[in-house]
Amino acid sequence: MKLKSFFLLPSIFAPAAATTTPTTNTFDQKLDHFDPLETRTWAHRYLVNDDHWNGTGALPNGCKGPILMYTGNEGPITAFYGSNGFMLDVLAPKFGAYVVFPEERYYGDSLPFGNATFDGNPSKLKYLTTAQVLADYAHLITSIKASTLGLENCPVVAFGGSYGGTLTTLFRLTYPNVVVGGLAASAPVGYYDSAHWSNHGVDQYTWADIAAKDYHEADPLCMSTIQATRTLIESTDTATLVDLFNVCDATGLGPTTKSDLFSYALESMPQLDYPDSTPPWPVNDTCTKLIDAQSHGDQALLEEAATITKRCLGIPFQQHGSSSSCMSTLAEGPGSIPGDGPGGVSAWSFQSCTETLHVFGSSVAKGHIRDFVFNMEESANKVCKQLFQTTPNDAALTKEFGGYSIADNAQGVTNLIWSNGGMDPWHGGGFYPNGMLPNASTPLLTSDDLRSVHYIWIRRGAHHGDLRGPSKNDPKELTDARTQEEAIIWGWIQEAGSKM
């Protein structure tokens, strides 16, 4: 979360694309769902796959087959489609399901003001809120059901990862009449409820603690090697680094230090630590290669650091030399708030400045990758005022929807699965049955059967890895998690489909 969506980092860590091809559609969506005087609309892109919607999933209430819906988050919906093999390649064939992937407004091709959406006019961005996104999805799916023969009585199950998992959680909470249940993978809802962090074992360093822990566990020498690499980068002349890291100019290395980009890649990697990456388990692979390179001298270590950074962030490997083959300076990420935050005129930057600010810090003295002191004025207010003439409120989502109270049953939510991976820094904001962060002895599945609320813990799991398609390298606990999720979801579908 990020955040750029870590579903969407253009790296070789991306999973194999789903094996099915969707149909692309657009829907005439309301610009403002809450102002009856606002009549403007925009073209909302969504993907549909009905390859398996053939009657094999027919339910007693006349439904031809259930609807599986991904609550699209901060990026083009085509990328999320390719990253959800569990939905598309496992559940859809078994359930005979109709699959819908709506795109979040202000991302991909779903731009309410077309190419002028990000022209610097804040009034064009004010319609980008979580509440509007949820209303989009409720309006869209209700209309699809009403206009498609055989879908009228079909139960809808939502799926989402990262901020998409937050959307799935809030969708079920806000529109229980529209969606019968949801799988919210790596949903960091608690990170937006900082007023109650201390009651749940969370603080401003939790995100960085988890990211660093992955490297410490991969190899006892790994973190000292990382710090030696950062020191070496700082002492290397800028021109050499620009060529090695293949950035278009010196600003691409980072806004504060020359090792910002390298540190950003390493911070990103634990959430991408998948068993089916290339290479598999990239955190372990990174530690092994850095330690080996260090034994061969400074030049070998610099080259390996650059290779790791380019692979993780999707930087072209071509020799630096032209703007078409190098990476432009990232407006958001390197040197900024761990996990990303506001930076540049973009949709996610705007959301960070309104609803999804991450109040995180980092400290080398605490064993983390780098130092970052969060300061509301410098890290957030000043940036957001300059970009969008607004100031962030890190409690905005909690005030509107609830934070930890959602999991604590203060709002009576039912039929949700919250899954989290132990190697994912975003699991620090997840929901757990006893309210505290899990440990090595935490069981795979804990349930409140009365509410059909389930907490799935995948100790060797990365960022929403259970939504990816199965891999031969998957640890047993990840395979078991998907098995549990499938059974729970099928139970919701059967229950809803039995109501005439």
Image (tube, grey):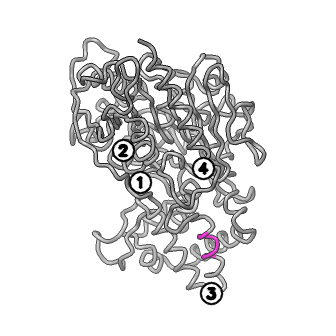
- The tag earlier along the polypeptide, 3 or 1, is 3
Q: Foreground: 265 or 453? A: 453
Q: CA distance from mark 4 to mark 2?
A: 34 Å
Is the Cβ of the residue at disc 3 closer than 8 Å to that at disc 4?
no
Q: Can residue 437 be spotted in the picture?
A: yes
| Mark 1 secondary-structure assignment | loop
- The tag earlier along the polypeptide, 1 or 2, is 1
Is the Cβ of the residue at disc 3 closer than 8 Å to that at disc 1?
no
Q: CA distance from mark 3 to mark 4?
A: 39 Å
Q: Which residue, as the protein is rendered here, is positioned at the far bottom?
A: 296
Residue 346's disc is 2
Q: What amino acid is labelled 3 in the image?
A: Gly
Q: CA distance from mark 3 to mark 1?
A: 33 Å
Is the Cβ of the residue at disc 1 closer than 8 Å to that at disc 2?
yes
Estimate the x, y position of residue 358 in percent, counting from the top left.
Answer: 56, 41
Residue 331's disc is 1
Q: CA distance from mark 3 to mark 2?
A: 41 Å
| Mark 4 secondary-structure assignment | helix
- Main SS, magenta residues: helix
Q: Which residues are magenta?
A: 285-290
- The tag earlier along the polypeptide, 3 or 2, is 3
- The tag earlier along the polypeptide, 4 or 1, is 1
Estimate the x, y position of residue 60 in percent, counting from the top left.
Answer: 40, 19
| Mark 2 secondary-structure assignment | loop
Q: What amino acid is labelled 1 in the image?
A: Ala
Q: What amino acid is labelled 2 in the image?
A: Ser
